[in-house]
Image: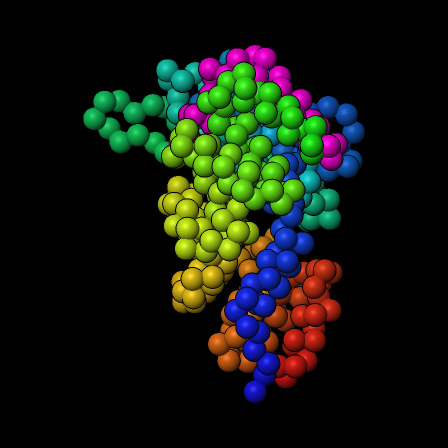
Amino acid sequence: MHPRLKPKELWFFALLLLGCAASGMVRAQSTSTTGDNSSGGIIRGRVVLPNGGFLNEEVRITLQTIRGVDSSVYTDNTGRFEFSRLPQGRYQVVAEADRERFEITTETVEILGARSPSGSVSLVTIVLKEKARPGQPKAASISATELDSNVPSKARKEFERASALNKEGKSEEAIEHLRKAISLYPRYLMAHNDLGAQLLELGRLDDAENELRIAVSLDRAAFNPILNLGIALIKKQQFSDARDVLDKAISLQAQSPIARLYCGLALLGTSEFDRAEKEFLAAHNLGGAQYAMALFHLGQLYMDSGDRNRAREFFQHYLREAPNASNSGQVRKLIAMLE
């Protein structure tokens, strides 16, 4: 018989490890379109017409992270754009052309790091989608509220200042500017979402939940606030509510590995082990080695259910993908115990 963790012990252990391994998923990513590119990856792309032809007008290109819009640029007169100095990870690149003619188009791009076979440059071609005629099905697009064009310039400047301060690690100052942005425009969804994410990082969970619920109420189809709200509820150990919220997030973006990962954690908390297993597997299948933590949670799940062989298998798989993880020593002890 192997020692079994009590549910509460398992949860505090799992969440602690998740916080160490996944902190980069919640923190805003640093981006720049000028200067030295050696300190990070590059997303380089081109926007083309539905027939593949070049576009000779400016298109707004927005880079999104878990917390919403991080940075934006405009294409040149041939449709080209670039974001540089990006940390390793997955990004949403959103192209917003003439709204009368085209849908908002989103592509997922991954920065693999400078040691990847293709280097640190990720290339993407965004093909615009024409708006459907009446009676024809409409192409899927992101929520327009997340790119609200009604935000006053003063509120937008406060938001941009908050983003810059956050990148400098000045969270409290960033929070003050986000609050100013919201006071200038109370329906500023991105500011509410970003403020909620900042408070979440600082452990001010009740305040974070409040801001994220406001953001969700502004647009119930906005993925980022819904995802962040689910994370906040997990940290508050409100697993049933978190499961429902994260199910909604998955219904909006079924291919999101982070939504699948956190949904798996919520399902563990509600003792829905079969579903939790499926969500962890989906998280890893969609996200690859960046979501190796899903393998660790699968190992914990199987160990707790008494399946020693599968637990050992997933712990070993976890270490192959994350050999330098902060919990690698503990995982090696678990493997030795299970042999």
Q: In this view of the protein, which residue sits in the foreground, 327 or 97?
A: 327
For the N terminus, give its image quadrant.
bottom right
| Vertical placement of residue 245 versus 83, above or below | below
251 sits to left or right of 171: left
Q: In this view of the protein, which residue sits in the foreground, 201 or 292?
A: 201
Q: Main secondary structure of the magenta part?
A: helix
Please identify the quarter of the rendering in which residue 335 is found: bottom right
Is residue 195 in view?
A: yes
309 sits to left or right of 165: left
| Vertical placement of residue 266 versus 103, above or below | below
Q: Residue at x 59, y 58 (%)?
A: 15
Magenta residues, start to end? 141-170
- Residue 165 part of the magenta segment: yes
- Residue 287 part of the magenta segment: no
- Extreme-front residue of the structure: 206
Q: Residue at x 47, y 61 (%)?
A: 269
For the C terminus, give its image quadrant.
bottom right
Which percent across, then down, holds residue 129? 39, 27
| Vertical placement of residue 209 versus 32, above or below | below
Q: Residue at x 59, y 81 (%)?
A: 3
Which percent across, then down, holds residue 62? 55, 26
Is residue 260 in view?
A: no
Number of numbered discs on residues: 0
Which percent across, then down, holds residue 159? 60, 23
Please identify the quarter of the rendering in which residue 52 is found: top left
Q: In this view of the protein, which residue sits in the foreground, 223 or 9?
A: 9
Identify the image's colour scheme: rainbow, by chain, secondary structure or one colour: rainbow
108 sits to left or right of 166: left
- Extreme-bottom residue of the structure: 1
Which percent across, then down, holds residue 153? 56, 12
